[in-house]
Image (spheres, coloured by chain):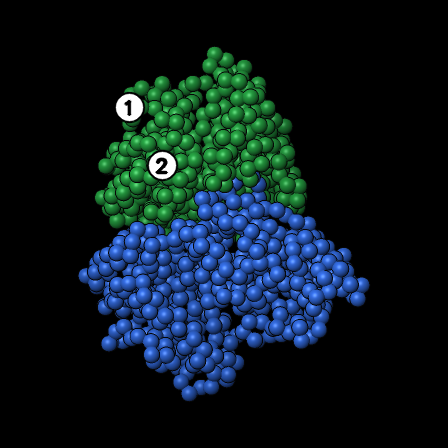
Chain colours: A green, B blue
Amino acid sequence: MNAFLDQCRAIAGAAHVLDAPEDMAPLLRDWRGRFTGRALAVLRPGSVDEVAALVRACAAARVPMVPQGGNTGLVLGSVPDAAGTAVVISLVRLNTIRAVDAVNRTMTVDAGCILQHVQEAAAAQGCLFPLSLAAEGSCTIGGNLATNAGGTAVLRYGNTRELCLGLEVVTPSGELWSGLRGLRKDNTGYDLRDLYIGAEGTLGIITGAVLKLYPQPKASITALAALPSPAHALRLLSLMQDRAGASLTGFELMSAYCLALVAKHFPDLPRPFADAYPQYALLELSSTESAGHAVALLEEAIGAALEEGIVLDAVVASSVAQSEGLWRLREHIPLAQAADGKNIKHDISLPVSRIADYIAHTAPLLQQAFPGCQLVCFGHLGDGNLHFNVAPPAGTPNELFLANQAAVNRVVHDAVVAFGGSISAEHGIGALKRDELAHYKDPVELNLMRTIKAALDPLNLMNPGKIL
Amino acid sequence: MNAFLDQCRAIAGAAHVLDAPEDMAPLLRDWRGRFTGRALAVLRPGSVDEVAALVRACAAARVPMVPQGGNTGLVLGSVPDAAGTAVVISLVRLNTIRAVDAVNRTMTVDAGCILQHVQEAAAAQGCLFPLSLAAEGSCTIGGNLATNAGGTAVLRYGNTRELCLGLEVVTPSGELWSGLRGLRKDNTGYDLRDLYIGAEGTLGIITGAVLKLYPQPKASITALAALPSPAHALRLLSLMQDRAGASLTGFELMSAYCLALVAKHFPDLPRPFADAYPQYALLELSSTESAGHAVALLEEAIGAALEEGIVLDAVVASSVAQSEGLWRLREHIPLAQAADGKNIKHDISLPVSRIADYIAHTAPLLQQAFPGCQLVCFGHLGDGNLHFNVAPPAGTPNELFLANQAAVNRVVHDAVVAFGGSISAEHGIGALKRDELAHYKDPVELNLMRTIKAALDPLNLMNPGKIL
């Protein structure tokens, strides 16, 4: 192994082959601090050619590789296992915005670019790169692509997959595929791009990408609507889509319990309603015309929803600043949740039309199995994505309740599958949900995935033990 | 082979195993009438289970299979070769709309459904299925998916790939993958869906799909703008996108020569301008609010473009009926072209920002090589997709000029590749462009495709000789 590490030093420079435990530590620990792996070394290549040369060295020495971006993943996809035989290949030094083409509405970037820097580079050219999520200040675009990240703008702009036109990938044998095309239409063979996107680094290492940009909306305006039930939220979603089409850029569902948690832990935040209601929807309309256009369209739609009895009460922001205030309520749910103690988290998706039925079906099952448990149910309703978290009954210590994780997962995920949903909407599988995937996935589909993995990574060196 | 055909008859019924030459003929001839293949038989399964059973029978007997939908493809992808050893598996009897879910905005369909029927079923529920192309009255959605069809709505809604959430596929060994998920977010492993989409039936047979639906716009309004050059068309596109965002649903470029051809062969169509201009752009704005909103937005934007000197003259339709009249000019270009005689066709795409430079670079090269040749250049500018067709010089018989096909392709496609474009934007590769693909495609990418093909179809029985 010393010869192998010497070879890595010759490729990337001694300063970029870390093997001291204290240097490696932060890159071996997962974002939520639940697991720390071990590694032979952390490699920090400074160019695409160095990535390819390191991969060839790893392949020759049969050393497993764990590609890593900002290491902000939630499913143990970017940290090595406990064996200590793998290297981490960190992409963070590949952080150049290679080109912005405002007319083609594309940007070519290194995989290690921080998402926020990508957003800023787009904005500097009067364009929008719409991917937005909580970790945007430290996650990398390569990690976003490898996990097909979701976030808050999926309703209008799609997942990371839909925001990418071309990729550059180092294969498990260290060949470079230059697929950095900035084309809206290209029907010349198999869609390799989408195979690497979402593969969580198990088929190759993404080193660069061509991203899609959009016109920057003139303004985004939000409203908060109080609703009798999730079923009413679905009716409101349909009404908003019919009236606003692609101008509807956000539609989040929050239960009364969620906003009560926020009020408890962040008493300084605004409380838009004097009364409490069972459910709330946060809506966002964006206009390429003007803020006034967005406000008028939103007020008219909310007015119609009030008249039809879909909405019980509503606040429409009259400015961008007020809109940001309403978004803060939504953004503080995860923080309020954390302040309240650990709970059992799920990242599920469902056909949008089945969300109300899913909640109505599953909440009583949870009560039956874990009497008094609290449902922290919120999420991106417009995408069918719920964060369906289960907190302990009042008085039960959180750590004690966490022992029920497997049993709670079974109730939640059995119901998800019965309703045609997914056990991982936007976080991926990694090592954390691998057994859950094997439990639920159609064997034909699993077998197709294994066939592809074996064909493209015959030595099983690329992020082994993740997904499959 | 008799035993094999008997087995097929036992599966699909004798009436659906065609082996008389006159019965098979229309399914062996390509849409443009340039090639007629031979086959052992045409099989017409009536259910997904029958498709799977027929595929298993073919695999056991080592009989190559050519999946076929409406057989309207343009690249010889859905007809067998001349060997006569393959069977055609026609999906046209699988033509049931299985379900429409207006709240989830999805529709589950059999692969053999005619595109127009899919559009109509969506409209009946107040929704839009936006895929639209010339062959929509006879092409099938399975064929659209297999070829990742483009069409006129790509600018706003994307290619067929972007309009599909889930697939059902019979693998080359006759297993059934049921991936009919109607989810906007699902990160549970490799993206098999997008691997089958655009694979032109070489990896399996698509038997069903979950399609995305959209809110039906209240109105679509068009304008025709006269422009000094393609570069001005690009400036107009940017201006329109900044002002109208997702409301811009069409942006077509047409050269003066194209509209002159239309005027020559269809003298009864309207002529919007008294003068002739070098280039024209047909713009379409759609509004989920009202026709008035679309007209106002379009007039304002065109006004700004006139003021900035981007546009020389313009006609804005004041109604949906007038809008349809303007679209007819664009739709009649292929017909006028055909009436004028055969020419050498290309279906290329480029980064949108490079289109004007591409035309300025390539047109003189063609003139140099083929003095007096006429460029019939039109297409979906907003998607970077040009139909860059080359007609003979005045007085040269078309058939004679066609002998230059390979040399013309070389000029056009060499330049496409030099400008970062694609030699097949929306038609695919099939058998027609297979050699061209091998000539231009990066060997690493070709090798990755071959690896996937060999892994998923080890006997090379699924539409062999297409793409690779």
**Neighbour class for label 1 at 10 Å: few (<14), some, many (≥20)?**
few
- Could you tell whether A293 is left or right of A116 in the image? left
Relative to the observer, which residue lies in front, A70 or B109?
B109
Q: Residue A284: horizontal and vertical position, in percent? A: 33, 39
At 34% from the left and 21% from the top, the residue drawn is A263
Q: Residue A313: horizontal and vertical position, in percent? A: 30, 31
Q: Are marks 2 and 1 on the same chain?
A: yes
Disc 2, SS: loop
Q: Of the residues shown, which amino acid type is indicated by label 1?
A: Ala
Query: Seen from this angle, which residue lies furthest right?
Result: B3
The residue pinned by badge 2 equals A310
Answer above or below: position of B57 versus A213.
below
Q: Residue B354: horizontal and vertical position, in percent? A: 37, 61
Instruction: Report the chain holding disc 1.
Output: A
- Disc marking residue B92: none
At 50% from the left and 80% from the top, the residue drawn is B402
Q: CA distance from mark 2 to mark 1?
A: 19 Å
**Neighbour class for label 2 at 10 Å: few (<14), some, many (≥20)?**
many
At 62% from the left and 70% from the top, the residue drawn is B27
Instruction: Report the chain holding disc 2.
Output: A
Q: Nearer the viewer, mark 2 or mark 1?
A: 2
Quadrant that contains the N terminus of chain A:
top right
Q: Of the residues shown, which amino acid type is indicated by label 2?
A: Ile
Answer above or below: position of A130 versus B325.
above
Q: Is residue A212 visible?
A: yes
Query: Seen from this angle, which residue lies furthest left?
Result: B307
The residue pinned by badge 1 equals A274
Q: Residue B81: horizontal and vertical position, in percent? A: 65, 70
At 58% from the left and 53% from the top, the residue drawn is B208
CB under 8 Å between callouts 2 and 1?
A: no
